[in-house]
Amino acid sequence: MTVESEIVRTGSTIKSRKLILGWLVLMVVLVFSMIVLGGVTRLTNSGLSMTDWKPITGWLPPLSQEAWQAEFDRYKAFPEYQQINKGMSLDEFKGIYAFEFAHRVLGRVIGIVFFVPFALFLIFAKIRGPLTYRLGLLFVLGGLQGGMGWFMVKSGLVDDPDVSHYRLTAHLALASLIFAVILWTIFDLTRSPSVARASEKAVRQLAWAILGLVALQILIGGFVAGLNAGFVYNDWPMMGGDFLPEDMMYMTPWYLNFLENPGAVQFTHRIVAYVLLAMAALLYLVSRRQDIRYEVRLGCVIVLIALIVQAVIGIVTLLFVVPVSLGALHQAGGMVVLAVCLYVAHSLTTGNITIKSGQRES
């Protein structure tokens, strides 16, 4: 389905396009950074250090010793301190507070960096039509993401000093969706509409299947993170000396194992990774044998390389018992894999946003 929009007729179309593309590239970099920082916040157990939500205020950390002590005293009233961090010093508290504070401030920065240019582009009629609706959807998703973040944090401020892995996965899914929509829009605005080729049908089907499986793997990764499943079995290729973990199916009904059993969730994450590697290899082989465009063939090679590198990072992260640096790198790698899969899928999709002008582009 063709999505048409106009970067319209006042001034130079080329200048308007460059401004909008520059803005969207900045946005995708900020969202990528936000996702990685969110992973670091999780890995350092920092997410519950701020026990209230001030979406409008809250731009500054405590600025005096008294303010820090008051913030620390609030933290002490919640289960994470009482059950896990009892005896933590104020300086140690400042360390975990810094990550969560940075995560929240970056979220606010992203909101402002998106909203102000978007409003100006609308006021000065630089965008209109379906592109406006897509960007409006992104703004709504960003607001929902902020609310989902607090909804997630609240789940760890009650009896169990850990956030709900369902809410954490929803938080990651929304962030990944925002990242994907921005990237897809960038691809729409930088590529001419493609023409479907019969010879590319098999590659197109495989590319979309891989993209769907990557999306599923990101969700499973959220479950792995939320259940701390990466710390359960730290050998490879076996799990506790066996291919199937011994606690694979101890929950009833059986399907709960794939939702709440850390061993089964980690096993599923591994199996999906193997399937993705096999499908990426098949995509590469099919692309070599078909009459397809060079950019598509190159994209298929990059997808295979990205998935191999991501699998290696995942294995090393597991073997070293999920250090913060490798865990963050693995999360970043997941977004890189998503980006290259989106690029290949987009390059095989007919009907992009077209850019129209009432003036010559000269």
Image (cartoon, rainbow, N blue to C red):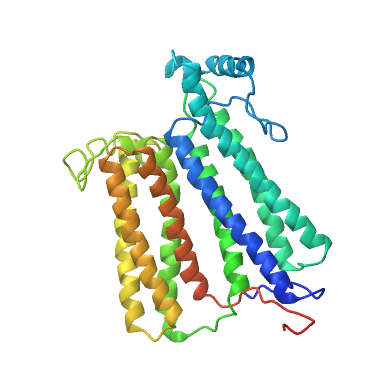
* Residue 215, position as x, y percentages in the image: 46, 55
Q: Residue at x 27, y 40 (%)?
A: 320
How many numbered marks does the figure carry?
0
Left or right: where does residue 359 sit relative to residue 181? right
- Locate residue 241, reporting x and y percent: 16, 40
Which quadrant holds residue 288? bottom left
Q: Residue 208 or 18: which is nearer the viewer? A: 18
In this image, 281 relative to 26: left or right? Answer: left
Q: Position of residue 345 (x, y in %)?
A: 48, 70
Picture quarter with the N terminus: bottom right
Outermost left residue: 241
Q: Quadrant of residue 75?
A: top right
Residue lying farthest to the front in this orientation: 64
Residue 275 drawn at (x, y percent): 31, 59
Q: Where is 154 relative to 104, above or below?
A: above
Residue 326, quarter of the rendered image: top left
| Whether residue 22 is situated above or below residue 3 in the rendered picture | above
Quarter of the figure that contains the C terminus: bottom right
Residue 338 visible at all: yes
Q: Is residue 173 visible?
A: no
Q: Residue at x 50, y 42 (%)?
A: 37
Q: Camera-side residue: 5 or 250?
A: 5
Which residue: 38% across, 48% down?
A: 330
- Residue at 57% from the left image edge and 51% from the top image edge: 31
Q: Is residue 145 left or right of residue 291?
A: right
